[in-house]
Amino acid sequence: VGLTGHLGSGAALIDRWELVHVTVALPRDAPVVPSLAALSFPASRFEREMRDLLGIEPAGHPDPRPLVRHGFWPETFYPLRHGAVTPDFEDDGRPFPFTEVAGDGVYEIPVGPVHAGVIEPGHFRFNVLGETILKMRARLYFTHKGTERLFVGRRPEDAVVLAERVSGDTSVGHAVAFCQAVEALAGVDVPRRAKALRTVLLELERLYNHVTDVGAIIGDTGFPVGQAHCLRLREGLLRVNKAVAGHRLLRGAIVPGGVAGLDALDGRIVQGIEHLVRDFDEVVQICLDNTLVADRLEGTGRLPSDVARDFGVVGYVARACRVPCDARRDLPSGAYEWLDVVPVVERAGDVQARLQVRVREVRQSVAIIAAALADLPTSPGKVEVGALPPFTAAFGVVEAWRGRLVHMVMADPAGRLHRVKVVDPSFFNWPALARALDGNIVPDFPLCNKSFNCSYSGNDL
């Protein structure tokens, strides 16, 4: 982390009911740590990221390839080191060493990074026999913006705006995780009213994104009428967001110490949401009763539960293959501390299961919103966040709509941010998409991809 000329490496292991944080001090010149890659696949990817951005070498790591770094980065440029100066960039002319598959009739299909749709960039390399996918590998980080570096030097109250924009569709999730980390560092507990209202906003964010995803998945099966209706319902939910928080994506309502501008939020919104969700249930039933839609969904993009556990996948991707991870239950914060949230679990691990988890969580979110607002305290919605102890790490963990989301913050002696680490759910779920595609056909890639719906920006930072 760049303290007194040294680097610090930290590892945070989130088990079901606890968070274990381990740190080690390293010399700035030639820093080396023992690799944990043999014990954990997610750890292997964090180590590659650490090597690219901080120059810390994981000794014994089995994969020497870069993760974040693209070919035009100078070899000795480590942008997350304090004092790093942005150099001139020049393409080294070397292609990325993708894993190759050889054999009679095997050929490659490169897709992206520029796509036909209005989406962010990512490159996908398919090894194919006929139409059957033998292996797919993704090359990401085309949207790497140095987001974590942009936090440095800001005051926490000014940095919430940046947290809200780490991944545009997860404004509340990132803002709450960031603020929880700041509050944990300051040793303050937000009022019960703020906890309840933050929970409502998290569930509103889950609602509109799940409805959108269900429509997009249905649309990719070739049934656009279902997607059209889901987009209509999404618009209704976005208007609820605007009425509640003054912003269609719920930005500006989460602040360190609590919430802001939500004085009019009460149980009256539940009736409007319930009406939209009843309409949503009818649309889903019409879509799933269509045999062509069902044929495209069932058995497509199956992710085995053992692979999901080994890859550390989170959120609806994990819960769709019998892995009941949910931070609302496992590491509860906000109103989840007193509300009993039971993870929604499906067994098949295919596109159909990932869709069904979303459908069931839409109904669950309405119930959580109603419960959080049923006994809303009249206490203040915000407390002051005091001085932040310097060079001490604190964490915020929330179950955002895609899955578990983590922010780590560290302050300097002036109370400004010295280091921020963001872990979006997509960091864990992108590699699992490649495994879910094994043995599927190329035309099913868009459907599988949409059922995962990983964030490029959230992963690339």
Image: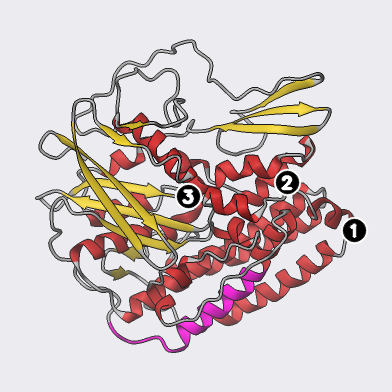
Mark 3 and mark 2: Cα distance apart in space: 22 Å
Residue found at the very far right of the displayed protein = 291
The magenta region covers 360-379
Per the image, label 1 sits on a secondary structure element best described as helix
Q: Which residue is label 1 attached to?
A: 291
- Foreground label between 3 and 2: 2
Q: Which residue is mark 3?
A: 168
Element marked by disc 3: helix
Query: Distance of mark 1 from mark 3, alpha carbons?
Result: 35 Å
**In this view of the protein, which residue sits in the foreground, 312 or 172?**
312
Q: Quadrant of residue 85?
A: top left
Which residue occupies 56% across, 54% down?
309
Q: Give the total of numbered labels.
A: 3
Residue 461 seen from this side: no
Q: Residue at x 36, y 75 (%)?
A: 195
Q: Give the percent coordinates (x, y) of residue 200.
A: 46, 73
**Callouts 3 and 2 close, C-beta under 8 Å:** no
Q: Return the residue at label 2.
A: 447
Main secondary structure of the magenta stretch: helix
Which label's residue is closer to the chain start, 1 or 3?
3
Kindly report which numbered mark, 1 or 3, lies closer to the viewer in this rendering.
1
Graded by Cα atoms within 10 Å as few (under 14), some (14 to 19) or many (20 or more), the crowding at tag 2 reads many
Q: Is residue 370 magenta?
A: yes
Q: Secondary structure at mark 2?
A: helix
**Identity of the residue drawn at 56% across and 47% down:** 454
